[in-house]
Image (cartoon, rainbow, N blue to C red):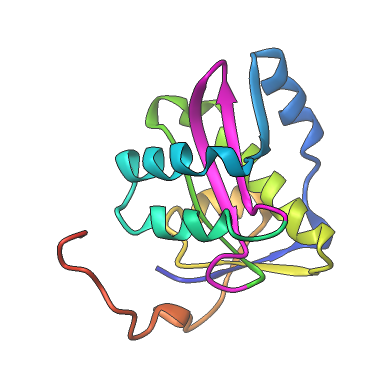
Amino acid sequence: MPDLLVKLYALPASAPILERLARDGIEIRRAIAAEKRIVTRWVGEHFPKTWPNECEIAFHRQPIACIIAVRSDALLGFCCHSVVCPDFLGPLGVLSEWRKHSLGTALLLTSLEALRAQGYAYAIIGWAGPVAFFEKSVGATTIENSEPGIYRGMLRDKMQE
């Protein structure tokens, strides 16, 4: 899977999506420290077994670099940034039954806006799975010869795969 480049100075507006989700009772917000165990456990239950490790690192950033989608007391999705490298985005995951509600786009935009607020002009989406989603949502472009990129030579736990 390739890495993708995103121009943070050319992001689409997030307000319309966030406002629509809010009307449906869905909040997109930065996670708080007291939620670390809940969020990382949930990520491990629903997504690849390496993602909780990255999510946990997001909780050690200041400010916390994990954005979550919540409805009532239910966690619906998450997006981390500044984990693998300071300007990297990911992982990002949304429960399958909520993927047609623009939650992924809202989480993506909110996380990219956080990177822009930190002074970055560009962000890298590392090892992007759904390339078409990122291209459509934020105009991401493929970084040629970026696979496996930063993940080259990474140790893998055969028990977690």
Asked which quadrant contains residue 129, the reply is bottom left
- Residue 6 in the image: above or below residue 72: below
- Quadrant of the drawing holding the C terminus: bottom left
- Quadrant of the drawing holding the N terminus: bottom left
Nearer the observer, 80 or 56: 56
Q: In the picture provided, is 13 more to the left or to the right than 40?
A: right
* Residue 2, image x, y percentages: 45, 71
- Residue 36 in the image: above or below residue 139: above
* Residue at 81% across, 33% down: 15
Residue 129 part of the magenta segment: no
Asked which quadrant contains residue 18, the reply is top right
Q: Main secondary structure of the magenta part?
A: strand
Q: Residue furthest left?
A: 159
- Residue 143 in the image: above or below residue 117: below
Q: In the picture provided, is 47 more to the left or to the right than 138?
A: left
Asked which quadrant contains residue 63, the reply is bottom right
Nearer the observer, 158 or 13: 158
Residue 28 makes an appearance in the image: yes
Q: In the picture provided, is 107 more to the left or to the right than 90?
A: right
* Residue at 53% across, 58% down: 90
Residue 79 part of the magenta segment: yes
**How many numbered marks are there?**
0
Residue 147 makes an appearance in the image: no
* Residue 94, image x, y percentages: 46, 37
Q: In the picture provided, is 161 more to the left or to the right than 53?
A: left
Q: Which residues are magenta?
A: 63-85
* Residue 17, image x, y percentages: 72, 30
* Residue at 43% across, 45% down: 40
* Residue at 41% across, 59% down: 53
